Image: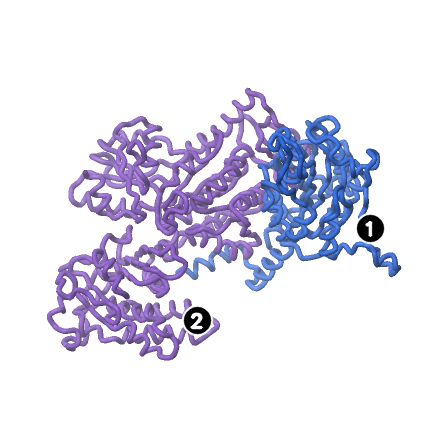
Chain colours: A blue, B purple
């Protein structure tokens, strides 16, 4: 029997998991921070989907948004800066019974952890990653972030940012992420919708969520918020209904079309840019392990190791 | 080793072509050191490894030593095999028998041939100084004869196996066993490969070497009936399978010499056991993914050499703070930086013990032999689980590729169950109890009181909530330190080899076990009052070492690293700091090569 199959699956949790069950420490975020809404959407998602409570894992790296696991009563981990994707990958790859959710900010995802994001995407690890993008370093009190727009004045760019910002959707597309969506923390229903679709996706699913830092970059995302006079412009997804207007809609399996949409000027579009059903590393590794074990006649661990030592004689 | 007067009768007075003796007369020997010197692409490693494996199968003791160039392809390389009856503890200071494939092989290695030793050279490529009467010169056109035997397009590929045939004849080796080893090694899908190998072997074996050499050598029978069966393997392989025996099924790493062969083995082996080893994009991802496996309840391994361990350091600090078990293997090489990537050094001891931010006590172990690579991996896994902490294994470049024969382990009694403990945790579960050892509830574990734990790198209270409380930081720092003190109480005090008291005690750690042991034996044979002690547990140290030190006039710590600013090597410095004992001296070297017995004797007796 393989190791992953041998994990005992306890009887389902007796009671319904409610928001009360999911609430832990009171968030330490500043009043008005966009992250509160993301947390609320996450509670809502978990309430709606009723996953076994003990099988939910909430992980994060370092940053304001990465305090997330303390505010959620699930198994959780608060890791080091930038390396949360490989940590979460280890959990996902060795425990198919778990639902792995990862939360973090733009510094974690696109700067110090940029390489890990790319390789998590390339390997197509089965997990859901919500990147709360606020275009600024908040925890360290206003330095330039990898998504800060050109000209943004910060303590490290007192005369305005001069480095080309990262385009998260383009980066994720070229890296090979298999589910890429964008949402806005003021649009709670859309946020929940995106989280649900990400959860249903088998593979590396990433949501970039614009989440305002009221302290160091107030009003950054007003242009995408109708209540502040902006426009929350949704991607018009193809419905495959054969109508002439469907021709004009976005095919989410079309990588090049998604890349073009990602180039729209700020505040850009919201919704699912791309989704593909490329096999996950989880599935491919399991397939290799299973077929190897079958070829060997499903030996016990002792039989297998003894055979190896017999060959050394 | 063969003493010089036992060796061949000088044959240099009769030209090699005169068939004065067609048959070799037999002579018994206890052990022999054979050095094959050529280029790395000549396959001398595989010929040497076959010899070592044969020795293991013939119940002889064996130890090998090799150097490989750090160039991408080719370059001078040696493979030394010492095989014989009784304990073979080091690969030998000098060779009894040198095989030189090229002129540079001859020039670089003739100094390692002992007086009266046999130089067997490829007369197609080597012109030795035949006037040097210290050695027996045996010239054989190895290249030409190999090409002749194999014909076709093989060129001189196969001359390693030709030489193996020669050696088999000279040392009267068991050809039945050797042939089956050849079949195991070369008997793949393409039958022509085995055919070629067999032809090359037979050509070498059939060469009338008796025309030049006086004797063939027969190893005395050592092991008797009823002795445990021997297995023969190298240090990196032994370590990899030790991890499997110790119940490790998951890991992640990035390739680097001389660590890579462990990850290559585990990448193929773990899936057979239902586990997984992942090659990551970098060292930081590798340690992080390994921590993900461990956090999920599957004790994991990551590894590297010194430079890669430096990159993993931040995450190892997290493992100390969050109290996540993890095994970190460092196969040490010459440093710092890219340093001497294919040479040996023991210069990462400080890094293993102190190389981190904050107060982050770690467990550090070091295997002494190839056999110990297997057992230390089991010990590392045991400690990591019991104390929920990162554990370093400090191996090195010489152990990585050294081949030794050792008693087959009793796997049935050693195998550890790898399953994560997901039994529901009762009311009041605290992930970080102040007065106890942390044992995490991995995700998937039902919590009876409905409170789910968060593991964290922030200082925390007993429930894992972040805190800046001075009282809690004091308490938690002490908690993380105390568990290592508890571990120290259960570590056995190492045995003293030699006499219980005396003039000098040599203290060693890691791969230097063999030469130190042999040095003590040889010194005691000469009446010197010298003993030795070898440390496997370097942090924490076992209790009671001071009582042992008290019985000797001098303590000499022998290690392969620099004497540092203040004149003491890395372990010597730690022991001096720990015991404040001015008797503790230091003997170090930094030539990137394993200790020779002679060097240790000189270093200790001076």
Where is residue A254 drawn, in percent x and y? 74, 57
On screen, residue A229 versus residue B60, left or right, reads: right
Q: CA distance from mark 1 to mark 2?
A: 62 Å
Mark 2, other Cα within 10 Å: few <14 / some 14–19 / many ≥20: some
- Tag count: 2
| Residue B496 in sight here | no
On screen, residue B243 versus residue B500, left or right, reads: right
Of discs 1 and 2, which sits in the foreground? 1
Against B120, residue A86 (above or below) is above
Where is residue B134 drawn, in percent x and y? 14, 60
Number of the label disc, if any, that sits on residue A236: 1
Residue at mark 2: chain: B
Residues tagged by mark 1 and mark 2 found on one chain of the structure: no
Please tell me which residue is depicted at 65% across the width and 54% down the height of the picture. Answer: A280
Residue matched to label 2: B187
On screen, residue B48 versus residue A272, left or right, reads: left
Q: Secondary structure at mark 2?
A: loop
Against B345, residue B542 (above or below) is above
Where is residue B389 drawn, in percent x and y? 50, 36
Residue B533, located in which quarter of the rendered image? Answer: top left
Residue B170, located in which quarter of the rendered image? Answer: bottom left
Where is residue A107 drawn, in percent x and y? 63, 38
| Residue A206 in sight here | yes
Q: Residue furthest top?
A: B471
């Amino acid at each position: 029997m393989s190791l992953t199959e041998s994990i005992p699956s306890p009887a389902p949790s007796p009671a319904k998991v409610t928001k009360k069950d999911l609430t832990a420490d009171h968030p330490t975020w500043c009043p008005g921070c966009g992250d509160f809404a993301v947390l609320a959407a996450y509670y809502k998602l978990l309430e709606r989907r009723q996953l076994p409570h003990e099988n939910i894992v909430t992980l994060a790296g370092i940053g304001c948004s990465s305090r997330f696991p303390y505010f959620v009563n699930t198994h959780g981990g608060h890791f080091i800066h930038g390396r949360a994707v490989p940590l979460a990958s280890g959990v996902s790859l060795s425990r198919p019974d778990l639902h792995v959710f990862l939360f973090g900010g733009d510094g974690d995802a696109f700067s110090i952890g940029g390489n890990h994001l790319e390789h998590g995407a390339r390997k197509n690890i089965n997990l859901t990653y919500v990147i709360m993008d606020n275009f600024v370093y908040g925890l360290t009190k206003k330095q330039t972030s990898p998504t800060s727009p050109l000209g943004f004045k910060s303590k490290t760019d007192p005369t305005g940012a001069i480095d080309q910002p990262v385009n998260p959707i383009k980066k994720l597309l070229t890296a090979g992420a298999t589910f890429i969506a964008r949402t806005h923390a003021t649009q709670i229903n859309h946020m929940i919708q995106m989280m649900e679709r990400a959860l249903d996706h088998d593979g590396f699913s990433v949501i970039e969520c614009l989440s305002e830092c009221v302290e160091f970059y107030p009003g950054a995302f007003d242009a995408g918020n109708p209540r502040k006079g902006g426009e929350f412009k949704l991607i018009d997804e193809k419905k495959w209904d054969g109508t002439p207007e469907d021709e004009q809609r976005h095919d989410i399996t079309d990588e090049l079309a998604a890349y073009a949409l990602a180039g729209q000027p700020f505040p850009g579009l919201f919704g699912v840019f791309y989704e593909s059903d490329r096999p996950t590393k989880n599935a491919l590794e399991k397939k290799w392990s299973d077929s190897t074990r079958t070829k060997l006649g499903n030996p016990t661990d002792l039989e297998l190791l003894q055979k190896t030592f017999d060959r050394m004689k | 080793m063969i003493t010089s007067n036992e060796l061949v009768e000088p044959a240099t007075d009769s030209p090699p072509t005169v068939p004065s003796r067609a048959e070799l007369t037999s002579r018994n020997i206890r052990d022999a050191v054979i050095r094959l010197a050529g280029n790395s692409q000549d396959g001398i490693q595989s010929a040497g490894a076959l010899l070592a494996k044969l020795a293991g199968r013939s119940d002889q003791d064996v130890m090998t030593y090799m150097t490989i160039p750090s160039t991408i392809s080719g370059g001078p390389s040696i493979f030394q095999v010492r095989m014989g009856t009784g304990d073979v503890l080091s690969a030998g200071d000098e060779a009894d028998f040198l095989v030189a494939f090229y002129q540079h092989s001859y020039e670089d290695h003739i100094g390692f041939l002992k007086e009266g030793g046999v130089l067997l050279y490829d007369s197609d490529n080597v012109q030795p100084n035949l006037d040097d009467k210290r050695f027996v010169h045996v010239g054989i056109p190895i290249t030409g004869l190999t090409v002749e035997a194999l014909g076709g397009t093989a060129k001189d590929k196969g001359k390693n196996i030709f030489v193996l045939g020669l050696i088999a004849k000279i040392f009267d080796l068991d050809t039945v066993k050797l042939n089956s080893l050849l079949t195991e090694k070369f008997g793949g899908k393409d039958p022509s490969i085995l055919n070629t190998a067999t032809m090359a072997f037979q050509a070498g074996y059939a060469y009338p070497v008796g025309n030049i050499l006086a004797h063939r050598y027969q190893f005395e029978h050592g092991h008797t009936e009823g002795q445990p069966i021997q297995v023969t393997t190298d240090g990196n392989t032994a370590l990899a399978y030790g991890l499997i025996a110790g119940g490790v099924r998951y890991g992640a790493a990035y390739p680097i010499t001389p660590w890579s062969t462990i990850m290559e083995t585990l990448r193929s082996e773990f899936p057979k056991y239902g586990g997984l080893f992942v090659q990551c994009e970098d060292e930081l991802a590798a340690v992080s993914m390994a921590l993900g496996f461990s956090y999920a309840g599957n004790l994991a391994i990551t590894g590297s050499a010194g430079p890669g361990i430096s990159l993993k350091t931040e995450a190892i600090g997290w493992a100390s703070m969050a109290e996540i078990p993890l095994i970190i293997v460092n196969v040490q090489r010459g440093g710092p930086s890219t340093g001497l990537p294919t040479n040996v050094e023991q210069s990462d001891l400080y890094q293993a013990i102190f190389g981190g931010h904050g107060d982050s006590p770690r467990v550090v172990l070091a295997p002494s032999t190839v056999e110990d690579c297997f057992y230390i991996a089991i010990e590392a896994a045991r400690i990591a689980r019991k104390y929920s902490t990162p554990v370093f294994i400090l191996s090195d470049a010489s152990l990585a590729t050294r081949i030794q024969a050792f008693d087959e382990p009793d796997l049935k009694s050693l195998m550890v169950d790898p399953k994560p403990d997901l039994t529901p945790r009762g009311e009041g579960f605290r992930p970080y109890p102040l007065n106890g050892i942390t044992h995490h509830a991995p995700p998937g574990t039902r919590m009876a009181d409905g409170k789910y734990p968060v593991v964290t790198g922030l200082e925390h209270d007993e429930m894992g909530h972040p805190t800046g409380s001075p009282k809690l930081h004091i308490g938690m720092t002490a908690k993380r330190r105390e568990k290592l003190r508890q571990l120290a109480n259960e570590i056995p005090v190492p045995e003293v080899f030699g006499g219980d008291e005396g003039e000098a005690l040599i203290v060693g750690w890691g791969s230097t076990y063999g030469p130190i042991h042999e040095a003590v034996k040889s010194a005691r044979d000469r009446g010197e009052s010298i003993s030795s002690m070898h440390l496997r547990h370097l942090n924490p140290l076992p209790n009671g070492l001071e009582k042992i030190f008290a019985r000797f006039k001098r303590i000499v710590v022998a290690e392969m690293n620099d004497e540092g600013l203040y004149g003491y090597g890395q372990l010597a410095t730690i022991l001096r700091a720990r015991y404040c004992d001015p008797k503790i001296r230091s003997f170090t070297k930094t030539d990137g090569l394993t200790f020779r017995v002679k060097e240790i004797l000189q270093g200790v007796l001076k």
